[in-house]
Every structure is written in C-alpha cells, then in structure tokens.
Image (tube, rainbow, N blue to C red):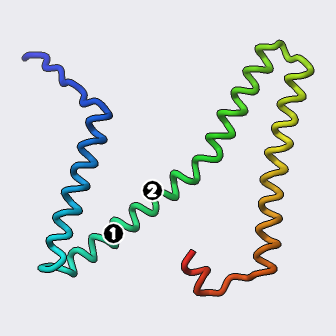
Amino acid sequence: MDDVRRKKVPQAVQILLGLALGLMGGTVAAHLRGSAPGLVEALVEITDVIGTLWLNALKMTVLPLVFALIATGLVRAITGSRGGRTSRRTFLTFFSLYAASALSGIVISKLLLALWPLSPENAAAL
C-alpha cells in the first residue's frame, strides 16, 4: 500500500472557506425566506443560540487569558532580574491595581444598580 500523505489545508484557507460558506448559506436563506419562512426562522433561532453561546464563551476567556499573560510576563521579568526589589514592587503594584479595579467595578456597578434599578423588561433584554 502506498503511504499517501495528505496535505493539511492552511488555517487561513479554512477561515476563508468558512466565510464563503456562511455567505452562501445566508444568500440561500434570504432566497428561501419567501418560499419557506418557517424553515428559515427555525434555522435563524438555532444559529442565534449557537452564536450567542460561542461569543459568551469567548468573552469569558478573555480576562483570565490577559491576566495570565501579563502575570507571566511580569514573573519572567522578576526572575530575569534576579528578583530585585524594583521588580517585586512592580509586580505587587500591578496586582494591587488589578484587584482594586476589579473590586471597584463590582462596587460601582452594584451602587448604580441600587440607584437606578432595571425594569424586568430591560433585564430580560440584557
């Protein structure tokens, strides 16, 4: 048997193919809207749920990844400078400011929601 080696499709090509398929799918759905509106509405609801889940998952990972990258960079800088006093102070200052900004964001949002509570309609819209 011949050892057939498959060439892997580059990621940029996969992305462009996905965009092209999405564009074609949207065009087909627009043309089907007149003849099969129930089918198009069902597809829109399904893709809306999947898209919302995907975007929420992406949003949920951004903050921990950014913090991990910055913290890793600072730790490498500290170890690279042999743990000098300035690098430790920089790391502690950064971590303190990061924690303070997160806590102040929580407190301020709670205060603003206490001053201007959301109506049930607005909460459902969010």
Identify which amino acid the numbered label 1 is placed on.
Ile
Q: Position of residue 82 (x, y in %)?
A: 83, 12
Q: Which residue is mark 2?
A: 54
Disc number placed over residue 46 in the picture, else none: 1
Q: Residue at x 12, y 79 (%)?
A: 35
Given the current orientation, which residue lies at the most extreme left position?
Answer: 1
Query: Which mark sits nearer the N-terminus, 2 or 1?
Result: 1
Establish if 7 lies above or below 14.
Answer: above
In this picture, residue 7 sits left or right of residue 113:
left
In the picture, the quarter occupied by the C terminus is bottom right
Q: Local crowd at mark 1 within 10 Å, few (<14), some, or many (≥20)?
A: few
Q: Quadrant of residue 115?
A: bottom right
Identify which amino acid the numbered label 2 is placed on.
Trp
Given the current orientation, which residue lies at the most extreme right position?
Answer: 85
Establish if 119 lies above or below 94.
Answer: below
Q: 76 or 5, which is in the foreground?
A: 76
In this picture, residue 124 sits left or right of residue 105:
left
